[in-house]
Image (cartoon, rainbow, N blue to C red):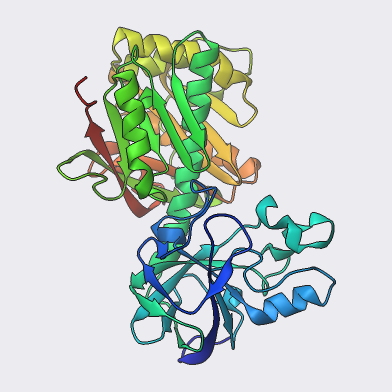
Amino acid sequence: MATDALVQGRLLHVNVSAGGVPKHPVPAARITRLGVEGDRQHADTVHGGPHRAVCILGIDAIRRVATEGHPIGPGTTGENLTIEGFDVSVLPPGTRLRIGDRAILELASAAAPCETIRESFRDGRFARLGIERHPNDSRMYARVIAEGEVRPGDAILVQPPMDDSADLHLLAVELDRAEASWSRALWRGAIEGGETVHVIEDGNLLVSAAPGIPHPSFNSALGLVMLPQKVGRATRHFDRHGTIGSLLTDEPPLPGLSASWELGRHSADPAAVRLDTPPAGVEVRELARNEVGAWAEIVATASEMDASVARAWRAAEDGLARAGHHHRFVAYLDGSPAGAASLHTHHGVGWLCAGSVLPGARGHGVQRALIAARAERAMRLRCEVIGASAVDGGASAENLRRLGFRRVATRRSYRYEPAAT
């Protein structure tokens, strides 16, 4: 469907439930930043939040699926708004829907089908609504640009995306998920190595607290960009274990908190990352699974870690070495160890992490060589994109820029101190 002009559709049903499916029609409802008033989700760390506030599905998609013999109907797969007049899932992210007099929604992403909606399909084949194989028939999530009441019969005006911000948000979220996967692997490795790390792993929310390892790498809350309403669960976890925590998100998660540091999210096509001139005397080698010890030692030394933090990284290396989706690299300068880094892969994304260069080897192109080597490995692993975080204005950000990365988003770390007991 062309999106260079206004297209008119109509709202057929507004659907809500106390949790789960089916969602039932109501005569009207107010749409707020966090969703449709009166609606709840059971799996609220997988659904909901400002970027998944409203779920939308077209009646034509429902009818196409029903003709195949599936017992589907409006609201049975959990959509909040059933619409007619156009297939919502063929519109690009960033498309805006003006519904009624006040409400404006912006399409954010496809809603991946899950087992919760299996009763709407023969033999439970809920993948029938997957956008990859059935692009016309997917549900779509939307964020709320302007709040307002909606009701069946309201006109829907479709407006094209204003810029590429929605696409950049989707890319940044994929990078966030890859980083979370890396953090999860680090924490599991440390636990397997005998360290005590208390972890919440629930949908898109990932939180760790390690009283004996006072460092953000083991005391962090991830997933709050998608689930800012879950910040209380993260802070309670820090309170319970008496740890200073890092809340990683894109805006202040609580009143009165200031960002400790700001990180740029950077991404690139791995095939496009090349060193114009390999640094003289620098060689990068990927470690075998059974080569354990040197990598963590370099990372700990180069990062000037406290003893307890360095101990945890050393403890984690054996688990990381055995993880099939984790790859460790060591760089050498004139034959001597100079730096270390990792590539962590997650659903087609290569995350560049743990990059560290020993003080005496800095200024010789070691970091750029580590970036290029990991990009080349990611390309061979068929990663579609690679990403990394870097402090704005620092040497790492400049090296990423020189190698062809672009900055796609900002993430900030907010220091949370546990409540007094």
Residue name at image x 50 percent, y 91 percent? 7
- State the residue at coordinates (68%, 62%): 130
Instruction: Work out which quarter of the rendered image holds the C terminus and state it.
Output: top left
- Location of residue 137 (image quadrant): bottom right
Q: Position of residue 265 (x, y in %)?
A: 37, 47
Compared across the picture, whether 163 is left or right of 192 comes to left
In front: 205, or 90? 205
Q: Nearer the viewer, residue 59 or 174?
A: 59
Could you say which is closer to the camera, residue 337 or residue 90?
Answer: 90
Instruction: Please say if 248 is above or below 121.
Output: above
Using the image, determine if residue 185 lies above or below residue 111: above
Q: Could you tell me residue 207's position as x and y percent?
A: 42, 31
Give the image quarter of residue 197. Answer: top left
Res 373 seen here: no
Q: Residue at x 29, y 25 (%)?
A: 239
Residue 113 place in picture, x, y as percent: 65, 57
**How many numbered discs?**
0
Position of residue 96 relative to residue 43, above or below, is below
- Which residue is located at x 48 percent, y 56 percent? 40
Q: Locate residue 392 relative to residue 278 in the image: left or right.
A: left
Please state if 259 lies on the left or on the right of 23 as rendered.
left
Quadrant of res 300: top left
Q: Is residue 243 left or right of residue 315?
A: left
Given residues 94 and 349, the one toward you in this image is 94
Q: Position of residue 361 (x, y in %)?
A: 32, 21
- Residue 210 seen from this side: yes
Q: Which quadrant, please, contains the N terminus?
A: bottom right
Q: Would you place residue 376 above or below residue 103 in this image?
A: above
- Point out the residue furthest to the left here: 256
